[in-house]
Amino acid sequence: KGMQVTDDRINAIDIRNAVKRYGDFTALKTISLSIRDNEFFTLLGPSGCGKTTLLRMIAGFEDVTEGEIFLFGDEIEKLPPNRRPINTVFQNYALFPMMTILDNVAFGLEMKGESKAAARKRAGEMLELVQLSQFSSRKPSQLSGGQQQRVALARALAPSPKVLLLDEPLSALDLKLRQAMRFELKELQRETGITFIFVTHDQEEALTMSDRIAVMSAGELQQLGDARDIYERPSNMFVADFIGETNLLEVEVDAVEAGRAQVHLGGGHQLSVDAVEGVGKGAKVHMSVRPERLYLSEGAEGPESLAGTVRANMFVGTDIQTLLDLDGGVQISVRSSNSERGNKRVFEPGQIAHINMEQGAARLLAD
Ligand code: ATP
């Protein structure tokens, strides 16, 4: 007990059957997951799904009702936060307003018993790492939001924690800065080699930065995988719907053979898709098809092309989104790239168009 080895290395964090209850309310229902050493790991889910609670349990700010947490093989769930080699970066930065930037970063090191000179030297190096050396004698109020966030990062990284927890650290920044900070955070993780556990409800943030993502909903882990797994192979309705945009079509399975499932849509139209575990003949399930994996043509391109009537076109800047009505009350959204290369013919409302699926575009969902 206490050791779990993957790829011959001990995991940074192992969460075993962790449950969190607040009185009668269960915020987390038996979560088990492992976070690898040197990984950029993201907990992703809508508000209230329990991701912050899980992060706070790892940090030690919340008790664990049941279960265990291991850090590099050592059981830690009963240790107070300051005895865990873990640091947290909060959404609101929590910098000391009266101290200079350098002192803000040095403070925690001095609290841990480092000499003033050693703490300041290390703080200077950390400010260099986040490219803020020229501001070291300023006060936090004299920096922009993005710069303050980088100070908070430097401060949290200064004592070389084994794991860095980041609780929606970009949410106070404007969109442009948030996007720029994604690259910086990712680079910082790579340069330091420290395991990052990042909490967000922003799926784009999760997809762009993470080595792996745990998607959560209502206190449960829904899927664990890298960005492509989660986006292209969602394991259920929740994940397919929460990540990106998708068409969720009701289908009935007519046959399953040799890894392929024959299904039909509400209007009777037949399609062949990859079979998935747990979905057999006679099952009524949903099929997820990303709008950008569909394209329109005037005539049918094959037996699986679907005829639809264009209801509306929406200009989305990078794309044009077309909504179509099919037989049987089925509605489908198609996205075409707004580029010279990608721009296929635009169909006007009322016109008939054929919808074609790229290879592997449709994904059956087990629930
Ligand atoms: P958000 O993105 O809004 O912070 P979250 O996914 O981080 O959401 P949590 O903060 O982990 O969600 O909360 C999970 C659930 O636990 C919520 O329903 C919340 O109301 C509940 N909860 C959190 N803290 C407490 C508490 N101290 N007492 C009772 N219920 C709590």
Image (spheres, grey):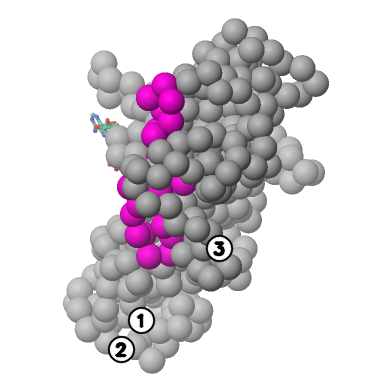
Label 2, residues with CA under 10 Å away: few <14, some 14-19, many ≥20: few
Q: Is residue 364 above or below residue 58?
A: above
Q: Main secondary structure of the magenta part?
A: strand
Residue at (59%, 32%) from the top-left corner? Answer: 363
Label 3, residues with CA under 10 Å away: few <14, some 14-19, many ≥20: few
In this figure, which residue is indicated by the disc labeled 3?
Answer: 342
**Residue 137, disc:** 2
Question: Closest to the observer: 34 or 253?
Answer: 253
How far apart, in angstroms, are the residues tagged by discs 3 and 1?
A: 50 Å
Residue 34 visible in the picture: no
Over which residues does the magenta segment extend? Answer: 312-334
Taking the view exactly as shown, the residue that stands out farthest to the top is 282
Q: Nearer the viewer, mark 2 or mark 3?
A: 3
In this figure, which residue is indicated by the disc labeled 1?
Answer: 102
How far apart, in angstroms, are the residues tagged by discs 2 and 3?
A: 51 Å
Task: Name the element at disc 3.
Answer: loop
Task: Name the element at disc 1.
Answer: helix
Q: Are marks 2 and 1 in contact (CB under 8 Å)?
A: yes
Residue at (35%, 33%) from the top-left corner? Answer: 49
Residue 16 sits in quarter: top right
Does any atom of ligand 1 lie closer than 8 Å to the CB of label 2?
no
Question: Closest to the observer: 74 or 127?
Answer: 127
Label 1, residues with CA under 10 Å away: few <14, some 14-19, many ≥20: many
User: Which amino acid lies under the numbered mark 3 shown in the image of this protein?
Assistant: Gly
